Image (cartoon, rainbow, N blue to C red):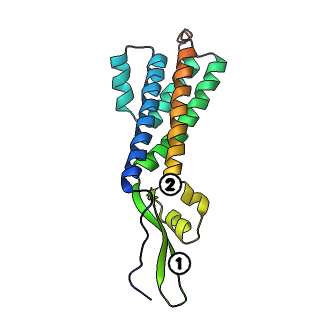
């Protein structure tokens, strides 16, 4: 068997990969801006105070606070809409983390010839997020669990589609924020410890 495998030219060029990643990041930035504006509105305080809180906590805490504020300040219909947006944002945030914290690697398809030589059929850049669980890695590459692999490996087309989905999510958050009306918070009731 030949120790060197001839590879074709990589597709797309790595510079295009970086441009697609940059576009993805810009789309996510729009989600964060609109999510902050919604958070600020629900918190019903000045923006510097809302900004200090928003940027001091992680996405899980933001989601929990928004859900709690929504149950206090929104009517039932808007609360249901907020809950749906929070769920969409959680899923998008998971994808965002995997794309951003992943790394580019070549996905190489190899043809093995009868004479023992090997030729690279294709060499495509993919963004790969390494799972923390070694069993997941074994399932992806040992057992060929395609579903699990697809949640950790992103082609250029995947990243472009996710950019579009994330941009649409940012518009949905903005529209929701523009249309909600806060209700007065309920009067605090004393706790009954009897």
155 to 50, vertically: above or below: below
- Residue 194 is at least partly visible in this image: no
Q: Quadrant of residue 86?
A: top right
The residue shown at (46%, 50%) is 98
- Residue pushed farthest bottom? 115
From the image, state whether disc 2 or disc 1 is nearer to you.
Answer: 1
Secondary element under disc 1, as helix, strand or loop, is: strand
Give the image location of residue 91, x and y in percent: 55, 41
Task: Find residue 111 and name its label.
Answer: 1
Dot 2 alpha-carbon crowd within 10 angstroms: few under 14, some 14 to 19, many 20 or more: some
Residue position for label 2 = 155
45 to 9, vertically: above or below: above
Q: Quadrant of residue 143?
A: bottom right
- Residue pushed farthest right? 77
Answer left or right for 18 relative to 171.
left
The residue shown at (41%, 36%) is 26
Give the image location of residue 11, x and y in percent: 45, 60
- Image quarter of the N terminus: bottom left
Closest to the observer, 25 or 16: 16
- Image quarter of the C terminus: top right
State which tag comes first along the sequence, 2 or 1.
Answer: 1
The residue shown at (39%, 84%) is 3
Closest to the observer, 145 or 74: 145
Give the image location of residue 136, x and y in percent: 52, 63
């Amino acid at each position: 068997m030949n120790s060197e495998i001839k590879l074709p030219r990589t597709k797309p060029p790595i510079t295009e990969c970086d441009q697609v990643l940059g576009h993805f990041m810009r789309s996510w930035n729009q989600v964060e801006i609109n999510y902050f504006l919604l958070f600020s509105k629900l918190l019903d305080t000045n923006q510097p105070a809302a900004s200090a809180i928003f940027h001091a906590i992680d996405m899980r805490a933001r989601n929990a606070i928004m859900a709690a504020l929504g149950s206090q300040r929104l009517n039932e219909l808007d609360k249901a809409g907020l809950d749906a947006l929070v769920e969409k944002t959680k899923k998008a945030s998971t994808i965002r983390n995997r794309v951003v914290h992943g790394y580019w690697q070549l996905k190489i398809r190899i043809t093995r010839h009868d004479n023992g030589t090997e030729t690279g059929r294709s060499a495509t850049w993919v963004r790969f997020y390494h799972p923390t669980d070694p069993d997941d890695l074994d399932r992806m590459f040992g057992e060929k669990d395609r579903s699990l692999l697809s949640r950790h490996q992103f082609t250029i087309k995947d990243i472009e589609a996710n950019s579009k989905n994330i941009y649409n999510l940012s518009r949905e958050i903005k529209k929701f924020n523009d249309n909600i009306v806060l209700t007065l918070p309920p009067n605090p009731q004393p706790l009954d410890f009897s």
